Image: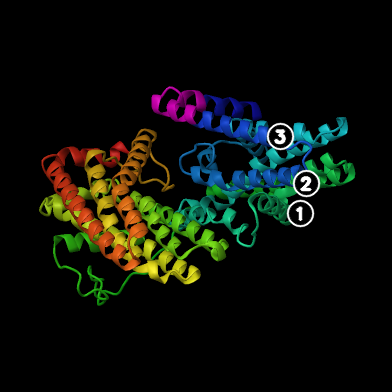
Amino acid sequence: MARDFARLKLRLIRNGLRSQQYALLFGMGACGAGVLALAGFVFLAALRGQAIAFDATLVLFAAVTVVWTVVPLLGFGTDETLDPQRLALLPLGRGRLLRGLLVAALLGVAPVATACALLGAVVGLSHDALAVLLILAAIAGTLLLCVVASRTLIALLAPLLRSRRGRDLLIMSIALAAFVPQSFRLFHTGNRADDTNRTIADIASHVKYTPFGWGGLAASEAGRGNALAAIGALFALAALIGVLLWLWSIAIPRAMSSSDLTTARAKEPSSRRATALFPRLVPFWPRTHAGAVAAKELRYYLRDPRRRGPLFAAMIVPGLFLFETLRDAPSRPGASTMLALVALLPASGLTLNQFGLDGAALWSTVVAGNDPRADLTGKNIATAVIVVPLVAVPAVITASITNGWAYLPITLLLAPGMLGVVLAIGNLVSVWAPYALPDRRNPLASNPGQGCVGGLAALSALTVDAIVLAPVGLFTAAALHSLSLAAATVLSVAVAAVYGAIAWRWGLRVASRRVYWRMPELLDAVSPRHAG
């Protein structure tokens, strides 16, 4: 049965390569995995003879295990080999199914690249034949732990991942995962080399006795010549793998038979009034076509996982900026408050493919009046309401930490003008390169062809944003260098406001004119049937 599952996995890969889009993505993924494997091998091999080699090996082994455990969750709903429910109709026993899934999971680009990267520990740490054998055993055990841990977690969470609550949890986890590496650096100061070595040693001391670090502990102890300690870590690793295999065998039938975990809302009484479209907290909200679209977009940001995904992604850069500020607060000048404006660039992802997020519902706005200018204006208003706090909150916190209150006004007042440029480019991309978004279990997944279009559009828009905003940045830098802060604030804010207003109005006019006469093509481009 294991051989049949292996052949099935290879057949799935081969059939996928018949598609040019899948072949392109597979080739890019294989090249990326090869580069990472080579980098890991060279890194571990180059540490030979250095005191930090043992701690660095332990940290790398632990990091690989953590990444392997979490990252496969991103492919749930799109990878045929991850969801056990696809095998529910096969007449297979628990043991045969477990062996088959394990063999299939060990086949692929990722396991091979991981094994090649970890083999660098043999070159970097081995000093005799026994050490080589123990390190090879640690590498094999770590790879097996990676596969078993990831598949066990998926089997346990499969019913949750099929639900809307699970999708929200997945998006939040991805956003928060970006802060984990920075959290290890909060309390380290000093020069770069000493700080790096101290950080690696500190992380190694914390993870060496955790299940994620047992494989690295066995390899590092074997490199130090402590054979008994290495064998003990290998036994602990083997016991952990056995426990996970047992949990996996129990979770597989449950994952195949459990229904989706959805939260049933209680029916509202008929006497209860429907929720108003316009929030009562903002009575000044315009009661116009554009205002209605803006109110609708804000509600969708709270309900649609496909919209919350880019929103949480846009929060990563401000969050990392705050982590760096907390870490280097004593050495940061007050002018670093202005660096909060960098959050505008990743937030530009919220402005791309604005009609694609509507999907099949776009026809309702067409029959309601077909006013693309008002639709884009409302979407821009909603985006501005979301993006401005992403700049304001980091700026205020940074100003309080670095005592840069004098630079807070120029930071907050430059944001609207720069946002006008970002919105203008987002409007143009939304009508020039619209694409359909799939309504799948995984909100981060997309059709391979449309994913390429979306990725290229996002990279191109980000590059254009940086280029078009460069004159504002250069003028502001020159004004701050040659004038007083008050004068530089007035001039820079005035120039940025005029520059952003002109750019936004021009982008809005061009985008609305283009889409007005091409609405049938736009409806067809964002239709769910093109999402795969």
**Local crowd at mark 3 within 10 Å, few (<14), some, or many (≥20)?**
some
Q: 476 or 293, which lies in front? A: 476
The three-letter code of the residue at mark 2 reads: Leu
Residue at the disc numbered 2? 217
Q: Residue 171 location in percent, x, y?
A: 46, 54
Answer whether residue 22 is magenta in the image. yes
Residue at the disc numbered 3? 46
Q: Residue at x 43, y 62 (%)?
A: 335
Q: Secondary structure at mark 2?
A: helix
Q: Colour mode?
A: rainbow
Q: Residue 405 location in percent, x, y?
A: 41, 71
The three-letter code of the residue at mark 3 reads: Ala
Q: Residue at x 53, y 32 (%)?
A: 32
Going from N to C along the chain, the mark reached first, 1 or 2, is 1
Q: Residue at x 32, y 47 (%)?
A: 470
Q: CA distance from mark 1 to mark 3?
A: 25 Å
Q: Residue 50 location in percent, x, y?
A: 77, 41
- Res. 207 in view: yes
Residue at the disc numbered 1? 209
